[in-house]
Image (cartoon, rainbow, N blue to C red):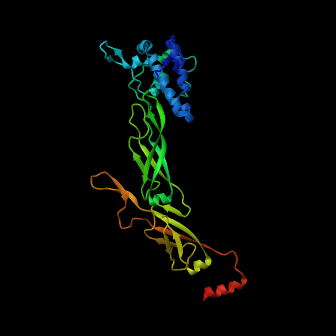
Amino acid sequence: MSKDYYSILKLDHKATDADICKAYRHLAISWHPTNHPKDYVPALNRFHLLAEAYEVLSDPVKRSIYDQSGEFGLKEGINEGNGSFSGGYCYTGNAYKIFENFFGTINPLFEAYGENTNILNLCNISLKEDQTSEEPPKDLIVEIPCTLTELYLGCQKKIDYEKLILAEDSTIRSIKESKTIEIKKGYSKDTKIIFYGKGNEAAMFPSSNLIFQIVELPDQNFKRIGNDLVYSVQISLINAILAEPVHITTLDKRIITVSPDEVIGTKSRKLIENEGMPIFKEIEQGNEPKKFGLDKRSVEKGNLIVKFTVNYPKYIPESSKQALCKLLIS
């Protein structure tokens, strides 16, 4: 369906140059994306349509061709009579530059121009079709929530997200996409999976990057510190004195036994080597591109740190105190 530039600017075909400028002045401020943070994409689409309509109708040559041949004739060019066309108009997505050239600022909240401003003076500012939009598209960052178990064992996750694309009519619209991402063992909150040039699009700029950012979800039993895991365990006073072994279920469902071998105090710690998180890092291989995988050192995991908390009884019967003192002093 062809575009009706007059309807876009809410004008009829008899509109004067002043009418066109007045209409663009009012509508461009009203639909500036900055004024619509909650409906950014629809406002941006309308903002581009207004800029394109103004760019055509404010130019006598373009307007004359459009009035005679419509959008198709305007964009296909002039028929040379031998079946070929020359010239032709193409909107380059320079809505922000058109706005800035018209008003002298990119800020839609300016107060420099009142209702009595000579609109035709604003129209005399020349427009350049080869100017690009205000700024390149921002990287598209998508978070991937992962449990500690998923980061320990590795997994695959299908992630849905939305991105901005440049449509054939030079407007920006939002589409839904999905990717299946491999979560490798040892990934952390610092891990970023980058797809270069697969992010948001904008006219006259290369596409931005699509970045998947790992988000670590808290675990009820373990706390991650770098490549180490911390496990907190509460034990009774009698078990602390007897140094009773503690049984821990690991993230991969193994049962390991921790034997303190001495009386456990309130600040006691036990370190178990190679029972922490898998160690993941980039592996350099000469001049070849970086590859990713587990650290190939002899220790492929971090450590497990067991922290003990002793639960002291709130009350000891008088009859038991002497026996306890005798036992501890002897």
Quadrant in which the C terminus is drawn? bottom right
Query: What residue appears at the point 65 percent right and 85 percent down from the top-left corner?
Result: 325
State whether residue 299 appears in this view: yes
The furthest residue to the top? 14
Query: What residue appears at the point 48 percent right and 33 percent down from the top-left corner?
Result: 173
Where residue 277 sits, quadrant-wise, is: bottom left
Residue 62 picture location, percent across and down: 41, 15
Residue 88 picture location, percent across and down: 37, 19
Front residue of this view, candidates 95 and 174: 174
The furthest residue to the bottom? 330
Front residue of this view, candidates 298 and 175: 175
Residue 263 picture location, percent across and down: 55, 79
Query: What residue appears at the point 62 percent right and 87 percent down from the top-left corner?
Result: 327
265 vs 32: above or below: below
Residue 191 picture location, percent across and down: 43, 53
Count of labels shown? 0
308 vs 39: above or below: below
Query: What residue appears at the point 46 percent right and 16 percent down from the top-left corner?
Result: 57
272 vs 59: above or below: below
Where residue 26 sits, quadrant-wise, is: top right
Front residue of this view, candidates 120 and 241: 241
State whether residue 104 appears in this view: no
The furthest residue to the right? 318
209 vs 116: above or below: below
